[in-house]
Each structure stands twice: as structure tokens, then as C-alpha cells.
Amino acid sequence: MSQRGFFRPQGAWVGDVIPYQEDGRFHLFYLHESRRTPREGMPWHRVVTDDLVRFDDAGPAIDSGGPSADDFNVYTGSIVLDAESTHHVFYTGQNPARRGADRLPLQLVMHATSHDGMRSWQRHPDDTFGATAGYDTADWRDPFVFWDADAALWRMLITARHIDGPTRRRGVIAQCTSPDLRNWTPAEPFWNPRRYVAHECPEVFEWNGWWYLVFSEFSESFTTRYRISRSLHGPWLVPEHDTLDGRAFYAAKSAERDGHRYFFGWIASREGGTDDGAWQWAGTLSVLEAEQRTDGTLRFHPAREFAEAFDQAEGGLAAGTVLSAPDGYVDAIVPTPAPSAFRLVARLDIAPGTSECGILLRASDDGDEGYLVRMEPQRDRLVFDRWPRRSTGSEQWQISGDVPFAVELERPADIAPGEHRIEIIVDGDLCVVTLDESVVLSTRLYDRPTGRLGAFVGEGSAVLTEFSVFSPSRTDGAASVSSELVTAVP
């Protein structure tokens, strides 16, 4: 993997990202997941980037507090800068050995400050506090702190759960307020839909008169969603398409620069490094850029800077290629294998009544096997699929999975007849698909590391008005170790 536009530390994985922008530079703190056994405590590490393409590894930021500390695991939080130019970090501390009345590990909000530009942090154990009345002590995490200028106070949003109610609908975003970032007072819940298990990694921000509430749905769906309002205090409206990406992209939080808003999350790995493996917690850092529509809803696509890093033409299929199969299937295959890292831009002018059409990735020479990015106009959905699937026996009918696409890799989309643009970025086992610069679907490609590109149509017709392939620029884009060394908190 080239690490252009993505980041994964050597020998470890990126968990929840805590993005912070200052003076044009993004400081991306993240939960550093080693997956070692026995568990050694979760620290924060940091990477920095100026261009959203190259990520410099600045190393450890906040170490685990140690086996006997409240913050053996240093979990998700947020960073703010006060009027005296002191950086404050609020984070979740957890130690499996420290348990509450329900015998589950306690989660606590903890505080540290930096006076040297976030190179080192001093913990303030006296500021630690746990769940307030009415909330589970084992779910009190992901503090997000921001300044409310209208009320002239700091607000902290906290992932929490009510102590009563149906187990899968106790989720609530709790709230505390403070005048000084040291003394916190419980307030009314910030958002209380009684809908999900929990609303992880919450954040709010204002953008051109609209307020946005972003959270990651901790439920059977595991996806990052957003809500919109004209007021910080709601009501919070549900956009028609309220997700940032699909199942594989999780725990995204954002930072703004020069009027542009970027979301930093992770593309989950799969157990065993196979296409059929279960999704795992943590993966590879990935960045999406949001654009705001006039009605306040958002569209998403990879950062423009990332797309522009692919500038070496690799060929493709001829513009004007017609794919027509009124009652069947037809495809067109690029005659040479695709590079391991590439950006594909395809435009398909879809005829009315077409059942399906899309792109083949890492396909066999005859196009029969491979990964499929499929538009289904009659169902208004974009899906990811693959062939062959596993078999449960030797008979023809024993094909594993009587499903119309790869489970959990589906996005709703408006696919009316006419031209649609698909952009696909592939780098090793990472794949990010964008439809019409608006709908993103990220995933992994494990089982087929090589193959050809192509386009297909089933029961209908489409004209390829563009099918261009680009590889990364030849300058070195790999991640490096930054000279801006970080002193981890002892």
C-alpha cells in the first residue's frame, strides 16, 4: 500500500480519530490499536498532514496510564484551545479491572493540558468524573467539548446510556457545561431519541447558518450519521440520506480548514484478511470531504487533494463504447491488468429501464469473476458485490449467501436515467467508491489482489462517455516519521 491519502501505522491499526486543525495543519490523534495479547493498554498516537495526501507519523501522544490507572485504556475524546493558548484534551479513561456497581468496567471523563504546542501533556486526575445520575457507569465516553458563544460557556457532549428502558434503545448524548474547563455541571441531555444502543463519537458544528450533529451509530448498523438543524438546540432533522459512508467506514469526526470540512474515520479490516472475514474494530485512516447543499444536506467524496495525486494516465476503455443487452448481460474488459493503486473515473449514460450497470474490479480475463460496483436504477441503490462466492457443498445450487449483494455494502442513491459518474480509488486492499461526487462506499479487497478493470450492463444499455485510469504521481507519497517528535505522557 502506498499510504497516499490513507494512513496505517507500522504493525498496528488506526482506531477512532480525534482531528484538530490549527494554522492550516491537521493534527490527527488516534487510538493506536496493536491487537496484541495480553492487552497492553490503549494509547493515543498522532499523525500530521498539510495536504491530506501525505501523513507524517509524530508517534505517541498520550500513553496508557498503566495497569493500575483509571486510564489503562485512553479512549476517544476531543481537543480545544483556551483564551490563554493552552490546549486541553478531554478523553475517556477505562480500566477493565475497575468496575462499577453493575460489575462492568467504569468509563470516566479525564482531562490533560499542553503548554508546548501539543508535544507533551500533563494529566489532571482531580478533574476526572464519571457518569452523572440516571446514566450507566459503563457507558460514559467520547467527550466532545466546544465553546458556545451565545451562552458564554463550554459544552461537553458525552456518549451515554440511560439506566432503564429497552437495552438497544437506551442511547443518549448526555451534556455537561463549564465556565472554565475544570468544573463541570450536568445539564439536560443534548439529544435523546431513545433509538440506538449508543451514539458514539458525537460532535456538533455550525456551517453557513446550519448546525450539524454527527454521531456513529453503535447498533447492528455501525455507521456514521448526521442530523441538521437551524439551531444548536434542535429540533434535529433527518436528511433523506443521512449516512456518510457504509458499514466499513466508522467513527468519523471532522475538522474545518478554509471553509472546507473534512471527516476522518477508519476503514475497518476484516478478520483473517479475507473477504468473508468479520469486520474488525480499527483499520486504516481515510478522509472524506463534505460539501453543503442549499437545503443544509451534505454530499461526500474523497478529498480533492487526494484525487489530484493520481496523475499518471494508464489507459482504460474508449469513450463512446456502447454496452447493450436488452434481455441479457454484456461487459467490456480492459485488455491489461490494473495497477495495484489507481484512480478510475467512469461516466455511464444509462438508458431508461436498465436493471443494472457498473464497474468490474480485479476481474478475470473473461470478466466472469471479480468484484462488482453495481448501480441498480430501479432500486435506487449502489452496491458492492463479488463473484464467485463461497460454496456450501458440491452441488450447483449450494452457493453461499442467497443475497443480492455483499452484506452491509449497500448505499441508497438517486440513479435516474442519464449520465452518472463513478470514481473509484484502489490502493492495495483498500477501495473507496464515489457515485456522482455525493455517495461514498468504502470497503476492502482481499481475496483478489490482481485483475482487470471493466464495465458491464445487465438488462438494458449504457454508453461509456468516459473510462479513464490513473496511477499515483511518481513522487514519493509514503508516510514518514515526522521530525516534530512527541513526548508521550508518562
Image (cartoon, helix red, strand yellow):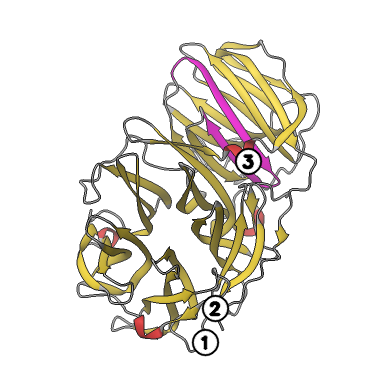
Q: Tell which tag, 3 or 2, sits nearer the viewer.
A: 3
Residue at image x 62%, y 21%? 456
Task: Using residue 380 as the reference point, say whether residue 139 is left or right of it.
Answer: left
Residue at image x 75%, y 41%? 340
According to the image, label 2 marks what residue? 41
409 or 4: nearer the eye? 4
Classify residue 161 by image quadrant. Answer: bottom left
Residue 137, placed above or below residue 385: below
In the rendered structure, which segment of residues is drawn in magenta? 416-435
According to the image, label 3 marks what residue? 306
**Mark 3: few, some, or many residues within 10 Å (few <14, many ≥20)?**
many
Residue at image x 25%, y 67%? 177
Q: Is residue 154 magenta?
A: no
Classify residue 361 by image quadrant. Answer: top right
Q: Specify which label sits upstream in the sequence, 2 or 1.
A: 2
Callout 2–callout 1 Cβ contact below 8 Å: yes
Q: Is residue 421 magenta?
A: yes
Q: Residue furthest bottom?
A: 68
Q: Give coordinates of residue 198: x percent, y percent.
A: 33, 60
Q: Mark 3 belongs to which amino acid? A: Phe
Instruction: State whether residue 269 appears in this view.
Output: no
Residue 316, placed above or below residue 232: above
Q: Mark 2 belongs to which amino acid? A: Gly
Q: Give coordinates of residue 223: x percent, y percent.
A: 43, 49
